[in-house]
């Protein structure tokens, strides 16, 4: 494990690991013999250093582009990631959806100034979600949890998933093959994006796709910003084509620590729009994130040492 957690987290991980597991952390030493490498962005040298290496664990959800670029040279490596963030990210998706639907941010801002006038505006900007349809793009670990939360609100839930060929049903959603996306958009009062960023999903939603959504509709993005064309999203929000949006992923990020205090998240002024709820890519950040990561990592390593199939296998060719 090249980037060990804080001492408390490392101690927890050690207590959860099977006694047969030998864990080393930090710098790769001379003549290493590790079988599993835990590193999200390993340099090539770490993938070649141990002749025993057969598995790479990325300690978060997703596959970094730099890592994906290396993997064709290591076809024998199995790649797995963690989904410890599924519950926190799904909860933030719900928070963004509710805040966007009920105009929580502008109402809060006005009342802090003693302004009660939004209460008396008829019709107001609040939307009822119960009885409406939610479309979840990406029915993985996070998407399944989002579906359960939307169902609890009384919404009909539709979802898309790449790895299926026929329409299926589970307890929370009707699931369609990904190629059905455009035909499902006109039914989506709430569009919730839980997809990874891959060459196939980049730019998936542009002006034409957003125009297919019914009015009023809400877009929530907890996947990656580049899945939605930035200019098209901004225009749809300004024109009223989209009622509102809740966004945890962005088009601009601070390039260094100094820039963290003054970097706007988009090339368009989303921060000026009252119908956008902005979140600084903190979907997985909760009080128990570190413990959740260690618990899920221990579960993954324990299955390996016991000879059981490891979950969360990543297909590096598709990107997830």
Image: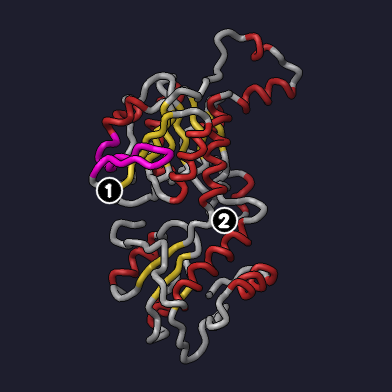
Inspect this view and state whether residue 285 appears. Answer: yes
In the image, which residues are magenta?
Answer: 166-181
Disc 2 is placed on an element classified as: loop
Horizontal placement of 231 versus 121: left or right?
Answer: left
Disc 1 is placed on an element classified as: loop
**Res 292 → quadrant:** bottom right
Count neighbours of disc 2 (C-alpha within 10 A) and say few if under 14, some if 14 to 19, many if 20 or more.
few
> Which mark, residue 164?
1
| Above or below for 96 versus 308 | above
> Which mark, residue 217?
none
Q: Which residue is mark 2?
A: 256
In front of the other: 253 or 89 = 89
Horizontal placement of 107 versus 274: left or right?
Answer: right
Q: Is residue 168 magenta?
A: yes
Q: Residue at x 49, y 30 (%)?
A: 245
**Res 123 → quadrant:** top right
Horizontal placement of 15 versus 235: left or right?
Answer: right
| Above or below for 88 versus 309 | above
Q: Is residue 109 magenta?
A: no
Between discs 2 and 1, the one toward the N terminus = 1
């Amino acid at each position: 494990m090249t980037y060990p957690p804080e001492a408390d987290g490392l101690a927890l991980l050690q207590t959860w690991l099977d006694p047969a597991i030998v864990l080393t952390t930090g710098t790769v030493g001379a003549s290493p013999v590790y079988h599993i490498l835990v590193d999200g962005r390993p340099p090539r040298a770490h993938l070649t250093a141990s002749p025993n290496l057969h598995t790479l664990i990325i300690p978060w959800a997703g596959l970094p582009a730099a890592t994906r670029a290396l993997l064709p040279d290591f076809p024998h490596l199995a790649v797995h990631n963690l989904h410890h963030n599924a519950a926190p990210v799904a909860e933030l998706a719900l928070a963004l959806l509710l805040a966007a639907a009920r105009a929580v941010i502008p109402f809060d801002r006005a009342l802090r100034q003693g302004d009660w006038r939004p209460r008396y505006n008829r019709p107001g900007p609040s939307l009822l979600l119960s009885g409406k349809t939610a479309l979840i793009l990406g029915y993985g670990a996070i998407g399944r949890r989002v579906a359960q939360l939307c169902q609890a609100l009384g919404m009909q839930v539709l979802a898309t998933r790449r790895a299926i060929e026929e329409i299926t049903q589970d307890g929370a959603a009707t699931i369609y093959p990904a190629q059905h996306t455009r035909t499902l958009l006109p039914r989506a009062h709430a569009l919730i994006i839980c997809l990874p960023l891959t060459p196939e999903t980049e730019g998936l939603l542009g002006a034409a796709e957003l125009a297919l959504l019914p009015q009023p509709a809400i877009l929530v993005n907890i996947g990656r910003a580049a899945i939605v064309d930035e200019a098209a999203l901004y225009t749809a929000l300004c024109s009223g084509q989209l009622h509102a949006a809740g966004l945890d992923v962005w088009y601009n990020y601070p390039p260094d620590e100094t820039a963290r205090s003054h970097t706007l998240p988009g090339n368009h002024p989303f921060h000026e729009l009252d119908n956008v709820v902005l979140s600084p890519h903190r979907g997985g950040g909760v009080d128990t994130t570190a413990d959740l990561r260690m618990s899920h990592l221990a579960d993954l390593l324990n299955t390996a040492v016991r000879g059981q199939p490891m979950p969360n296998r990543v297909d590096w060719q598709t990107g997830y």
